[in-house]
């Protein structure tokens, strides 16, 4: 696999994609993307955030398609092919993670549908996490 589009936000282990977040040792709050410093929970003064793999399944919270190519400096496929995007609420953590949807159109998605984390290349080649059928 090439270097991921954003280093440290996800990994592919044995062909299986995993999102990487951080969990507070004091209050167990989980956040994505991973962070350092203080816990994001305003009721917690914790500073001990540890990297954790997030759950790989969740349900569609919202979705759309991107019918226009992204502006420079982003690279779009030529000719541009619209992509499907979904905001997925992770099953265990309850946080919502946005990602491109692989091999599904907006007509095939609905709120509450279960999706699973996968990965694929962006138009310019680097791998990124995506959502797909379980």
Image: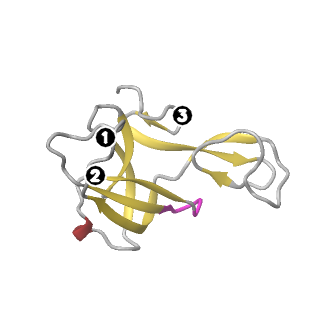
Q: CA distance from mark 2 to mark 1?
A: 8 Å
Q: CA distance from mark 2 to mark 3?
A: 21 Å
Q: Looking at the image, is mark 2 or mark 1 earlier in the sequence?
A: 2
Which residue, as the protein is rendered here, is positioned at the far top? 2
Q: Position of residue 27 (x, y in %)?
A: 78, 55
* In-front residue for pair 62/82: 82
**Is the C-beta separation of discs 2 and 1 under 8 Å?**
yes
Q: Position of residue 11 (x, y in %)?
A: 46, 35
Left or right of 36? Residue 63 is left
* In-front residue for pair 43/72: 72
Q: Looking at the image, is mark 2 or mark 3 earlier in the sequence?
A: 3
Which residue, as the protein is rendered here, is positioned at the far front? 72
Does 107 lie within the magenta span? no
Q: Evaluate whether residue 65 shows in this view.
A: yes
Magenta range is 89-94
Q: Evaluate whether residue 15 shows in this view.
A: no
- Residue at the spot of label 3: 8
Which residue, as the protein is rendered here, is positioned at the far bottom? 111
Q: Quadrant of residue 62?
A: bottom left
């Amino acid at each position: 696999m090439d270097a991921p589009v954003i280093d440290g936000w996800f990994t592919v282990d044995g062909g299986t994609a995993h999102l990487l977040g951080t969990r507070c040792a004091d209050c167990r709050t989980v956040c994505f993307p991973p962070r350092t410093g203080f816990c994001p929970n305003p009721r917690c003064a914790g500073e001990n955030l540890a990297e954790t793999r997030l759950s790989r399944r969740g349900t569609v919270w919202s979705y759309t398609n991107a019918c226009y190519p992204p502006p420079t400096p982003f690279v779009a496929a030529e000719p541009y092919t619209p992509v499907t995007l979904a905001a997925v609420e992770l099953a265990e953590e309850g946080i919502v993670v946005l990602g491109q949807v692989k091999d599904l159109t907006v007509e095939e998605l609905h709120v509450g549908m279960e999706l699973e984390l996968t990965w694929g290349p962006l138009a310019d080649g680097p791998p990124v996490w995506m959502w797909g059928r379980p």
